[in-house]
Image (tube, coloured by chain):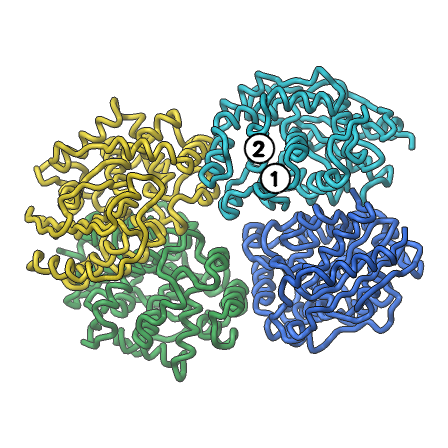
Chain colours: A yellow, B green, C blue, D cyan
């Protein structure tokens, strides 16, 4: 499979697509991004990388970080975490409080904001220096020592994060938040403020395609845990549009409001895209297009 | 892979499991089934079959039929059907009217009852003799000429089907049902009343694992449509428990309240189980166990 | 209090109001009504009547009939009916199925469609000739022998009544409908198709202002039942706008999509208006205005 | 009307009632109250007072304070406040976030917690010393200079008030909270922590029965505003049980989780009860009984 050729073709077609969607605007750090950025990067299981466009430029990974925080929580506590968060698609908008109320404070899954805040609470409880330790985990599993928080993004998130503060307080009222609300939110806002490039994301997610083993040969989580993580990305990775992504693309993956998407085909490749214009569901319009083209052209999907 | 050996082991372990769950009780034809029935059947892409237990005994396939009716609708109309039904997991109980109201009469997906009734309406519109033609479709794609409706089940469904009648009328009030309510429901109740054995189900679902081509070599739907059908089974096949099934089993599949489940690994195998005791979400308790064991023991899943 | 003078003033001001709102359009019999019709009629506890405009012209009373059917049900069965229907405001749109699902088939109150269908079911169970007997009840309590159904309205309601058919089937699926769905709906559609004028409505509702005793001196329901009926009109009489009506007008009352409203001040008067243009909540735009003016100008309300 | 005789009879019957319901337990200050306390006090429009039982003992008025804060907001800003809060019954539990989400941050009415927090925000914006000024308002309108906050209650509310913090943050995320979340909550928790006796409550609510004029002759709000306040108490005063209270008692009123209820008959009397055992809707079980007996025995209600 000549991946570079395929990526080149898709890239050329992509930049001719109508410019649909809007850049996330709730904080200045996201709203001021050039909306025309487009990066694509694919790393095969053999470690070969194929990239095009703005694939080396770092951006705010936002909700993509939820996969990594969940992975760390699972590696620390195992299946116990499922007492505090579910594994079902949400069926409603990604930051809805409605379902949380019906479910008595147990978020439907760890990728809606409420669920990710519970995971953040777990990490705050079990890590000595939560922010530093989380960063170390990503640096080790990706093999990239320079990955870091964007502090200005973290501060902006905090200053406009009333809905997340509502979620955290609501979780606490149900007894599903053990630490101080402000401490958990500080961790959560930092987690979402990690900056990475498309190429770096394919390296950080390599172990999900390689039975839990990172490019440097480290077993991050076991094979059974990888299966479950990929399953969760498949059913819950794209907010209220997870069914649509599975239907069109057919790969487990995760998106963020910074415009990034990462997806993978087990034992084959990890692919990441970045294009800041979002559709009405908060997913990158062009990123979805790129990935659908990729699985259509290659005929490679999990189905 | 010695599938027969694996199935034998799982079968032995299964019959020692605690007898949890309740047989569907809303019609006598289902409630009177022996709750201890257990059948497992697996057909490989090469056509080999491995079976154990009550794998040759026919049972009411119920909601499993929704996959087949959707397939026929897609083969007749293609992508046009997605104007009338969505592809997102429901996030609520399988016969809920709530979401239908919020969604203005467009069911979330074709596997919740409302969505399946819309598909039934499409088939009633496009088939000359809807019931006979649907039966022919299944007989041809499975290669089994004796597959038939269980008329007593169909009559019972009709006599207790007030919730489905509510759904159909509700859809009609939104303009998303074109034919007479009674005619559509008659088709729908018959569709759900098809009887098949585990072994027969693996034959009928063979083409989903074989890029759309049936065991007899007939192209039922194209490769891209297969991808989408498998994706839908993955995200929406198990009512309010689709996430759980994906998480534990990691295969696209579909369950029915008759206690049947069918699942598949593309290019590898199709597997079907039958055990009438259902968990609180309406899925076969033991069937879920069998399939989780299968993917755990073999290490074979889409993830 | 010179009611005629007050009504004249309000009438003059009313016809100068901007013509806001839309005539109900789901059946031709309602959509073809002249939208500029305006009638006002007020009958005092002493039996004096003051009227202006189209106050003698009959129109389709629609949901106003729900008060009369409930009254008959209470007079037949007393407090027992509250096992099958609640007394709380709905808090959502008037024909929503959502709440019915959460409440397990017990409608929130007898004035939402689901609740009125339960009351219709009760009357069908307890009346020998339901439609005739209901008509007799209204004729006797109002003293007007010519009140009748508009058969063409009843037929049109039936032909477009898929949402009500959905409700009735839904209620039946919960076990809260004892008779045949079609029979109950036939009664319900007739009940809503009664034609009365503003003046006639003040006579039919006279006993609610007179401790249960009609103008002809007949005790229709007892004093305690009157209190409860008026309370229900106060909290539930105007669909999703009951709070607004209470807030602005301060009288118990009931509206219908035919554009009619009837309201009353216990021991003082009964007032009825008719203007077909409806606001977004299904209540007569001008009727609300007239009644707010009346209680503001006279200073007479229950508060 | 011999009110003392009637109250004595009702009191005697009340203490023989089965002891149903539970004292509010979310803060120690409420949970440690003697559950058998029972006070009843009635003040007529002429200023006569009739009391029995624990009618002089102060208790935490809790949500009853919402009527007083709303009154002060209306007296300061008039009808403008209705841009930020509605007047419709909630139809769901009193602290639900669900409706707030559907309504895009506009609480259904000022007596659900979200609505009361919006009113608190308005008062924080418009009062120089919010807590002191609010206290002054109550002291002046009731004529009782010793009314005060119970600081230990206010502190406990704050320490367990995660759900209210969730509501405030949620409102802020919708732009319907102008001040700092903590400042608004501090005011709100103090407002709910006011202590008053049954007798004092009848004095503080006197002007609602007297066209806006307090016992000392001060016009607190105008006659039209009184009508609207009483209307709101009627439709929204008892959480998810407002319909039931209107239906059984037929008076506008307001309850609190401290076990207090105050109700009134315009131009006749104000009545208050205190009994800490609450029913499942958060209203005083015995208080509801006392008031239903009062309107039944006297035949005096707004209907």
Residue highlighted by disc 1: D81
Q: In this picture, is C86 found above or below B119? A: above
The span from disc 2 to disc 1 (Cα, nearest Å) is: 8 Å
- Choose between A283 and B61: the one closer to the eye: A283
Tell me which residue sits at (6%, 59%) in the image: A2
Picture coordinates of residue C271, whole percent (x, y): 81, 57
Could you tell whether B124 is left or right of D206 in the image?
Answer: left
Q: In this picture, is A64 found above or below B225? A: above
Q: Earlier in the sequence, mark 2 or mark 1?
A: 1
Mark yes or no: residue A235 visible. no
* Image marks 2 and 1: residues in contact by CB distance under 8 Å: yes
Q: In this picture, is D156 found above or below C293? A: above
Residue highlighted by disc 2: D122
Mark yes or no: residue D270 visible. yes
Tell me which residue sits at (61%, 70%) in the image: C25
Picture coordinates of residue A256, whole percent (x, y): 28, 45
Could you tell whether C121 is left or right of A26 in the image?
Answer: right
Picture coordinates of residue A74, whole percent (x, y): 26, 35
- Choose between C38 and C246: the one closer to the eye: C38
Subunit under mark 2? D
């Amino acid at each position: 499979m000549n991946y570079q050729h395929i990526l080149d073709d898709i890239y050329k077609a992509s930049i001719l697509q109508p410019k649909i969607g809007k850049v996330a605007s709730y904080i200045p750090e996201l709203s001021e991004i050039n909306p025309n950025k487009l990066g694509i990067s694919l790393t095969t299981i053999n470690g070969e990388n194929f990239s095009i466009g703005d694939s080396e430029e770092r951006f705010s990974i936002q909700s993509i970080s939820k996969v990594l925080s969940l992975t760390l929580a699972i590696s620390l506590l195992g299946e116990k975490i499922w007492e505090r968060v579910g594994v079902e698609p949400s069926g409603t908008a990604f930051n809805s409080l409605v379902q949380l109320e019906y479910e008595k404070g147990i978020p439907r899954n760890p990728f809606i904001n409420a669920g990710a805040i519970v995971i953040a609470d777990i990490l705050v409880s079990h890590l000595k220096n939560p922010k530093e330790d989380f960063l170390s985990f990503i640096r080790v599993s990706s093999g990239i020592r320079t990955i870091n928080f964007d502090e200005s993004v973290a501060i902006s998130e905090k200053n406009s994060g009333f809905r997340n503060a509502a979620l955290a307080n609501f979780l606490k009222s149900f007894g599903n938040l053990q630490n101080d609300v402000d401490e958990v939110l500080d961790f959560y806002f930092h987690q979402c403020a990690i900056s990475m490039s498309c190429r770096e994301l394919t390296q950080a997610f390599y172990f999900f395609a390689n039975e839990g083993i990172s490019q440097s040969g480290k077993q991050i989580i076991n094979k059974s845990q990888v299966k479950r993580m990929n399953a969760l990305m498949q059913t819950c990775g794209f907010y209220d549009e997870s069914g649509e992504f599975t239907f069109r693309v057919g790969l487990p993956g995760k998106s963020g409001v910074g415009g990034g998407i990462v997806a993978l085909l087990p034992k084959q490749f990890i692919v990441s895209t970045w294009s800041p214009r979002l559709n009405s569901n908060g997913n990158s319009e062009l990123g979805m297009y790129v990935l659908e083209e990729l699985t259509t052209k290659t005929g490679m999907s999990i189905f």
